[in-house]
Amino acid sequence: MKISLILACYNVSNYIDKLYHLLISQPYKNVEFIFVEDCSTDNTRNELLALNDPRIHIILNEKNIGAANSRNRGIEQATGDYIWFPDPDDLFDTELLVKVSKIIAEFSPDVVSVGMQERHEINGKLLYEKDILSKFNGLIKEDFNLVLVNLEETLLFGYTNNKFYKKEIIDKYQIRNKHQALKEDFEFNVKVFNVISNFYILNEPLYFYMKRNNSSLTTKFVPDYFTIHMKTLSSFISLLQTRGELSQTAIKLLVNRFIRYALSAIERNTSPHAKLTFKAQRKWIINHIFNQDHFRLMENNPHLITKKQKPIYFLLKYKMASLLVVLGNFVKVVKTKLPIFFTKLKG
């Protein structure tokens, strides 16, 4: 069974050498490595062209088209039975492909989802590790919603870098990545899980998600951050309704996730890049958060709010916009000055 690794590459020259040695040292050999170089401004292109392995294929974009469209180009070129989208600046266990190949050989699942380990680095020094695992393991053929809610609760659902997709399914339904500022992986998975009949959970932390303080996605200001995240909540609701019922467990996840996204958006709006005064931040909260359908879902289910979210829920429920701006500024300070503490506190 052949596995195609599709790696969208933009300004990752610092990681190519380590990744290359990890790839060629894999015990499982029936693989192809498709690098899609997206007009990097560093030395990524030259370093990729210098790699020497017959299983490596390099696609050079003529213009910068983003990770989603680069992965789509990789899908078109892939010849494997399964495709995988590891990030070129991440790492993974050397036994990952061996273990996945055995699962594929035995069960031929539509998707294999793997546990992850977050590795938090500050200025190149590893300071904190956290395993991200589901409470489920093995082949899932029914009761999708219960498992999907758990995967999203742990944040495992939204990633594509920890999933192997049967190419036949991707081709049959012409599933492709959609370019957007954030949550591209999440929307891809919604499309996939809408049509598959089974999937396998390999509940081991075999993919190492490297979270660095110089990560572009964590430092970049995205004006549509809140809108995009509200769309993902709606997409997830639609997926659950397609596959079954919207259970109380699912609603609990959704209302608490809404609170989390709302606070995160408020905190991001305190950034100088947002160019919003205190008054403008307050007005943004009133116009964008209090008018949301998801806000009303939260209001109607106070009994489902977790203890950690209760104080934020109180400010939202009584529409204390000024205090929410103050809280957002406080969160910004903690996030900037104590990033590891903030990560642990966030859970």
Image (tube, rainbow, N blue to C red):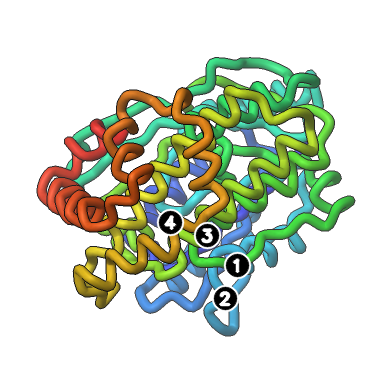
Residue where numbered disc 4 is placed: 289
Q: Residue at x 28, y 67 (%)?
A: 281
Horizontal and vertical percent position of residue 25: 50, 38
Helix, strand or loop for disc 3: helix
Residue 74 figure quarter: bottom right
- The residue pinned by badge 2 equals 65
Q: Residue at x 78, y 29 (%)?
A: 244
Dot placed on the residue nearer the N-terminal end, 4 or 2 = 2
Residue drawn at the location 51% of the way across and 31% of the way down: 301
Q: Are marks 4 and 2 in contact (CB under 8 Å)?
A: no
Asked whether the viewer can see residue 94, the reply is no
- Label 2 to label 1, Cα distance in Å? 9 Å
Give neighbour class at mark 1: few <14, some 14-19, many 20+ (Cα, 10 Å): some
Residue at horizontal 69 percent and vertical 63 percent from the top: 72
Q: Nearer the viewer, mark 3 or mark 1?
A: 3
Numbered disc in front, either 2 or 3: 3
Closer to the chain start, of discs 2 and 3, is: 2
Type of residue at label 1? His
Q: Decide which of tag 3 and tag 4 comes sooner along the chain.
A: 3
User: How many residues crowd around disc 3 within 10 Å: few (fewer than 14), some, or many (20 or more)?
Assistant: some
Residue 95 appears in the rendering: yes
Q: Which residue is mark 1?
A: 179
CB under 8 Å between discs 2 and 1: yes
- Against 187, is 221 above or below? below
| Residue 164 place in picture, x, y as percent | 66, 39
Q: Secondary structure at mark 2?
A: loop
Circle 4: element type? helix
- Residue 228 tag number: 3
